[in-house]
Amino acid sequence: MVGARFVDEVRRRDPDGERASLVVFGAEPHAAYNRVLLSTVVAGGLTPEAVRLHAPGWASERRVSLHTGVTVTAIDRPRRRVLLDDGSPDGSAEPYDELVLATGSRAWIPPIDGLLAADGTGELADGVATFRDLDDCARILELGRPGGRVAVLGGGLLGLEAARGLVGRGVRVTVLHPVGHLMERQLDAGAAGVLAAALRRLGVDVRLNVSAKRWTPDTGLECDDGTTLSVDAVVVSAGVRAETGLAADAGIATDRGVLVDDRMGTSDDRVHAIGDCARHPGTVSGLVQPGFEQAEVLAGLLTGADPAARYRGTPLVTRLKARGIDLAAVGDALAEDSGDGSTEDALEVLRLEDPFRGRYAKIVLKRDRLLGAIMLGVPDAAASVIQLFDSGAPAPTDRLALLLGRALPGEASSAGGPASAVASPALLPSSALICRCNTVSKGALVTAWRSGATDLAALRRVTRAGTGCGGCQQAVDGIREWLAAAEPAELEGGAA
């Protein structure tokens, strides 16, 4: 996704190819597609064709030399070329002036007996699948037939999305998570408990503090608590590792990622890295928004369109894409209470738990600014909190109203605070960020609509809103409906 976005951004700045010729190599046989929506493919909500990022013929139309199914085997830095495994007898090579690594990450296979084939090739054993790419989706769907039983190893974001998708297809799913609560990188124990209960109500068997020991297709999955799960297949979602092999073998500095600076440059000034393979001190891998922002910065630099462009990091908003569950984790939501609040830098932590209805809300404030939040089952409150987080505006004095997502008349900040919970798009400031993945504001949607993009498909095409994780599609459609119904005077008011 990030490599494709970089190409798009270069051609936006250089449509005729006068500044940059682009040659793209992808090891997968598929053209670029939206990885974030793979869980929806598993759930049956989208076909593999529907997650393609470009229409057929796009590459030739945009003057891009695209090579799919071709693996880059090495970087020859002294001669500035990459070596290719392209099917020719001795391979071939492609020269470069600037090299961009957007190699992403790979699924990590934990050291559990039976997950890998016994022949030593490193291939997955029969009945085992990872959840990382489009081919993985096909394998999961082949293994997870309706009425069958599947174990998912890992209770993180991807594992839970895979589990929910399979349950929606009629598969009986057990999630094994070796930690005491789900999504421990994003959620506290209270939120994770509510999430686990919600998943169980949807049909997912969640087992915590349990690890797999051995997989045998004929026997099942043996666990370290002494039980054996009689399952037909195992989906491994135990974490990822950045794809740094090419860079490391070429002597480029790596440390759990290809080390990059604010210009997305590596220790070789002709080589750059973006997305999940890159390690920048201002971001966390695994989310699409940082990669998209990095692609924009690098495109501006390499085309000369924006020599001052720098990447400074991305404020994190994580969303779980599982039908029937609305979960957002914002910023540093795991910060601890700091005592009695007597010091200026004390943290203010508020929680609201309603486990019987699958709701949990938590906000962490410091000096009246939102530091982090967890919003589960409270979509209106989540919308207000995310807008507040994006704007950096002071939090309203009525903290409970913020937790509940109620309208806050008179407390909106000129910096773009939440005048209300998205009940009416008219009350949102123009600067309100609607699509985080693509940094599309309400104002940008209004501008596009006024320019003729008056249906949902056109709005998405012109602004890219809704083409990342897909979490904002309802909000985008709501703004489109408001625009279509609004009087001209309302559109010309201060809010728009």
Image (cartoon, rainbow, N blue to C red):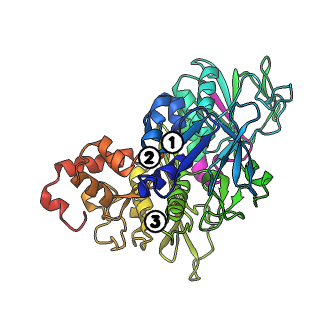
Q: Amino acid at mark 2?
A: Gly
Q: Secondary structure at mark 2?
A: loop
Q: Which mark is residue 305?
A: 3
Image position of 11 with respect to 357: above or below:
below
Earlier in the chain: of badge 2 and badge 3, it is 3
Q: Is residue 120 above or below residue 401?
A: above
The residue shown at (63%, 19%) is 148
Mark 1 or 3: the one toward you = 3
Q: Which residues are magenta?
A: 172-192
- Residue 471's disc is 2
Tell me: 476 left or right of 341.
left
> Which of the two discs, 2 and 3, sits closer to the camera?
3
Marks 2 & 1, CB-CB < 8 Å contact: yes
Pick the residue in front: 137 or 49: 49
Residue drawn at 58 percent across, 38 percent down: 67
| Residue at which label 1 appears | 321
Residue 433 % position (x, y): 39, 59
Residue 200 visible from this viewpoint: no
Label 1: which secondary element: strand
Q: Quadrant of residue 234?
A: top right
Q: If you read the primary sequence from the N terminus, does the residue marked by circle 2 or circle 1 appear first?
A: 1
Location of the C terminus (image quadrant) = bottom left
**Residue at the spot 56% in from the left edge and 28% down from the top edge:** 167
Q: State yes or no: discs 1 and 3 in contact (Cβ < 8 Å).
A: no
- The answer for how far apart the CA atoms under marks 2 and 3 are is 31 Å
Graded by Cα atoms within 10 Å as few (under 14), some (14 to 19) or many (20 or more), the crowding at tag 1 reads many
Q: Is residue 461 above or below residue 279?
A: above
Q: Is residue 312 left or right of residue 125?
A: left
Q: Residues within 10 Å of mark 2 (few under 14, many from 20)?
A: some
Image coordinates of residue 387 in percent, x first then y, are 41, 62
In the picture, the disc for residue 309 is none
